[in-house]
Amino acid sequence: GEDVEQSLFLSVREGDSSVINCTYTDSSSTYLYWYKQEPGAGLQLLTYIFSNMDMKQDQRLTVLLNKKDKHLSLRIADTQTGDSAIYFCAEMRVRGGSQGNLIFGKGTKLSVKP
Amino acid sequence: ETGVTQTPRHLVMGMTNKKSLKCEQHLGHNAMYWYKQSAKKPLELMFVYSLEERVENNSVPSRFSPECPNSSHLFLHLHTLQPEDSALYLCASSQVGGGAHETQYFGPGTRLLVL
């Protein structure tokens, strides 16, 4: 299909790891992104991965990319209550020239329980 | 601080009003975007300005009118809106072309309520 798919909800306990999954649609997408949105706020870029990479780690965040299955995941280690937010997966679909379209999933609401 | 600011942060308007949303980016980017975020729907791209020229209009109703006077400023003019236009309107900017990575950076959004 045409949609970027994510589970809508995830609940974890403080200190556990969180894994948020995403499937995207266009195998030619160049970059894949994770954005975080806290209540009442805009989107904050968390991390991104180039399509020729399998993994990217940035402090508590680990991004895994399975290009064959068009599957992207975000792992948050030692999840804290401040990590509670909506996490959006997005793919950059390249059109002609250099202008690409950023296509978002509906977002996964992460709830962290103390 | 994302380098992209939006005003106002909240707006309530009647269906006969005319209002404008403002976005300003301080990142030196050459492309700016308007997105609409409605409940339970993916973000919808409304307008793209790249190098101050409108690149595409995704069949957005004419009651939404964008304006990009320069590469740092973007407006969304609103008139005779409908209640279903109530949503969070997000502005973003990026650097396009020249082999640059086109990561989009977002503002905090304007929460619009149409009565």
Image: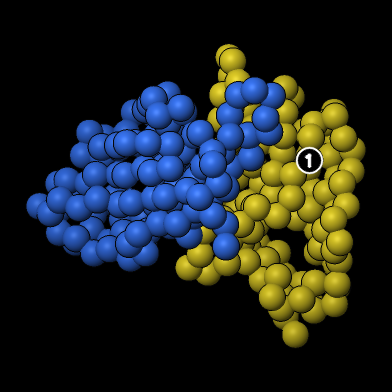
Chain colours: A yellow, B blue
Q: Quarter-wise, where is residue A105 in the image?
A: top right
Residue B52 placement (x, y as % from top left) = 40, 29
Is there any visible trace of residue B19 in the rendered image? yes
Question: Is disc 1 surrounded by few (<14), some (14 to 19) or many (20+) residues within 10 Å?
Answer: many
Output the chain of dot 1: A
Q: Amino acid at mark 1?
A: Ile
Compared with residue A22, is residue B13 higher up or lower down, i.e. above or below? below
| Location of residue B48 (image quadrant) | top left
Residue B66 vertical position relative to residue B4 in the rendered view, above or below: above
Residue at figure coordinates x 72%, y 34% from the top left: A31
Q: How many marks?
A: 1
Frontmost residue, B35 versus A109: B35
Residue A97: percent from left, percent from top: 59, 15
The picture places residue A90, in percent across and down from the top left corner, at 64, 42
Identify the residue under disc 1. A49
A95 on left or right of A61: left
Q: Quadrant of the N terminus of chain A?
A: top right
Quadrant holding the C terminus of chain A: bottom right
Q: Is residue B20 left or right of residue B51?
A: left
- Residue A8 visible in the picture: no
The reply, left or right, for residue A67 in relation to residue B15 is right
Which residue, as the protein is rendered here, is positioned at the far bottom? A114
- Asked if residue B22 is positioned above or below residue A79 in the image, the reply reads above
Residue drawn at the location 66% of the way across and 71% of the way down: A84
